[in-house]
Image: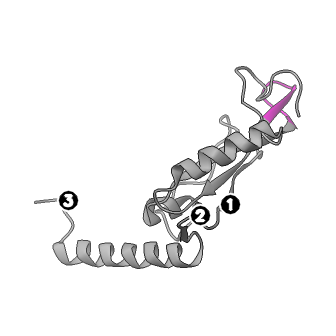
Amino acid sequence: MPGRCPPTQKNEALVNKTIFMNWFAENFVQTDPDSCSESIFLYPQSSGTTNYRNQYGPAPTPPFGFSAGRIAVLAQTPDMVVPIGELAYNSTVTNTTEYLPVTLSFIAAKNCDLVLFDLFAALQDAGIIQPVKVGPRMYGTESP
């Protein structure tokens, strides 16, 4: 059938994915019998940089390489994005100060999704992170 991957290529890809999944689990987010996930892996998701829709960017290219955003897909781990703040910028479209989110991604060990939910609840209870509100600002009119 057209568009199907030959079985040998599919098997090779699955072997490579399994190697990565095991390596990541053994070296970054090991399971723990008491806490489920021995550690949590953080990486920046968005940094509050502008990306204007009224400007042409470079021509698209084929995807190459690897990024942190692919880890959870290949390692079969939970990956949750949490807003930690916002950055002001001068919009060239509206000629006003607007705000862009700054976010972090949190990865825990496989099947440890609740560890992340519990962490976020504790961070919110401690006032470290806040719930996001509806509107042009993440936290309403005042920023933390």
Per the image, label 2 sits on a secondary structure element best described as helix
Would residue 53 be found to the left or right of residue 136 on screen? left
Circle nearer the N terminus (3, 2): 3
Per the image, label 1 sits on a secondary structure element best described as strand
Q: Residue at x 81, y 22 (%)?
A: 140
| Label number found at residue 42 | 1
Q: Nearer the viewer, residue 144 or 3?
A: 144
Q: Residue at x 44, y 76 (%)?
A: 22
Q: CA distance from mark 1 to mark 3?
A: 36 Å
Is residue 93 covered in magenta? yes
- Label 1 environment density (alpha carbons within 10 Å; few <14, some 14–19, many ≥20): some
- Label 2 environment density (alpha carbons within 10 Å; few <14, some 14–19, many ≥20): few
Would residue 90 be found to the left or right of residue 50 on screen? right
| Label number found at residue 68 | 2
Amino acid residing under circle 2: Ala
**Disc nearest the viewer among 3 and 2:** 2
Q: Which residues are magenta?
A: 89-99
| Label number found at residue 3 | 3
Classify residue 4 by image quadrant: bottom left
